[in-house]
Amino acid sequence: MTPNEMAAQQAQAYQVNLAARQMIVRNAVIRRQQIFAGTVDPATQWNVEIAPRYAGFILGFIVNIRTNVDVAAATGTALTKTPFGSANLLSQVRFDDLSNNTRIQTTGWHLALLDSARGGQPYLVNRDNTIAAGVNYPVDSFQHDNSLVYSPTAIAQGANSDVAFTYYVPIAYSEQDLTGGIFAAVNNATARLLLTLNRDFVQARTLTAGSDAGYVTAASGTAPADVTVSPFEIEVYQVYYDNLPRSDKGYILPVIDMGTYYDIKNTAQSAILANQDYPIAYSNFRDFLSTFAIYRNRAAATGAQGFVNTGDINTWAVETANFTNLSKVAPRYANAWARQALGNDLPQGVFYFPSRNKPVSTQTYGNTNLVLNAADVQANASILVGYESFFRAGTVGLASGLAPAG
């Protein structure tokens, strides 16, 4: 087969996939059905495994979590919200597909930020500012007040408050772009959604607590006393297309979409040196749509929201295998990109590198790194990174994705 013939065959495969996708979007019915409800105490059970409903074409899951934080009168320690607040009700979210491949393995904070990035605005605007977004950088004076669901700014001694969060766990990229979606009307195969509840939702104010906890003590290093976190109330809904279009040969399905994983992962790295480039590798054979990074360098002072001081970072860069920089900028430019993409600033020390319109492709560039050059490195400093990418699971059939109408 000549290169031109191969190109024509590939183009035909993508056209067939697009036609099948459009038929599903136009004709199928979206269902949002509850598949789990229960109350779980993270002190005794912190992993909750949920089996999806094996029907239709899975798009994702809605996860609602609510608890109550009670600070005892007289002896209780007053609490203040961390930059991520109730987004840290979950320590980790994992999804293993029908072939036992782990497509999602990430933190609650990353999933919350990703839901904002996918929507192009702060996620689930509501009555309070759950994530410490706002004017956090000297870019200009633009500001929105936003929230994810609900977590009060502080819980005083002798007070209590409900704390809640709603996550969307995406399996397909969107309801219109079905890349990553799973056809679940199958036999003899299983998948699982695994939720890891945060056993340390309330912590002493430390370097790590800002990204790991929902609430911390007002004074640094003070252990929380007489604080009660109620068992978590959990509801999970499956979002999927039902009543899929059919031909005389069976269901009409977008085979290329199903053969592409929507991959959401996170990592943590340390051993950073001041004023030296610190590379953070992008995985091979993927197209990266976004990267979130937290430079966790300081414990926030009382009442502060953030993980770094303004001058803790010299530059951020994206560097390819031949040491060519796709970008190398001071932090304020990365701050401006995040504001332009999300309509708001992220907490200090949290950076968003959008590449949704032109993905960072490690198939094109080879070994590629996100590179931090830090001006200041405190003891136990680390970088937390959340990735969003596409990658092909393997060879898929070409023109077999759309059965002919009969």
Image (spheres, helix red, strand yellow):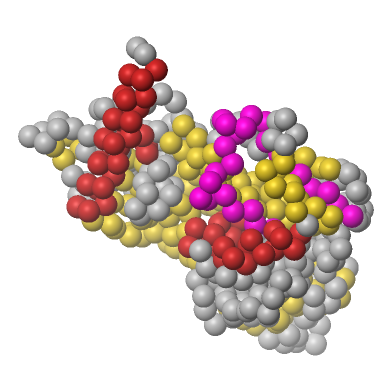
Q: Is residue 275 left or right of residue 287?
A: right
Q: Which residues are magenta?
A: 350-375
Compared with 387, 141 (above or below) is: below
What residue is drawn where x is 44% and y is 26%? 394
Q: How far across and how far down the image is residue 103, in percent?
A: 51, 40
Q: Residue furthest top?
A: 1
Q: Is residue 46 visible?
A: no
Verify whether residue 353 appears in magenta. yes
Q: Position of residue 194 (x, y in %)?
A: 52, 48
Residue 174 in view of the camera: yes
Is residue 368 shown in magenta?
Answer: yes
Q: Nearer the viewer, residue 192 or 317?
A: 317
Q: Quadrant of the C terminus?
A: top left
The residue lying toward the viewer, choosing from 153 and 253, is: 253
Percent x, y of residue 50? 45, 49
Residue 396 vertical position relative to residue 131 in the rendered view, above or below: above
| Residue projecting furthest to the left | 406
As drawn, the residue found furthest toward the front would be 4
State the residue at coordinates (48%, 47%).
193
* Residue 201 appears left or right of 114: right
Residue lying at 48% horizontally and 43% vertically, measured from the top left? 262
Residue 90: image location, x then y, percent: 60, 58
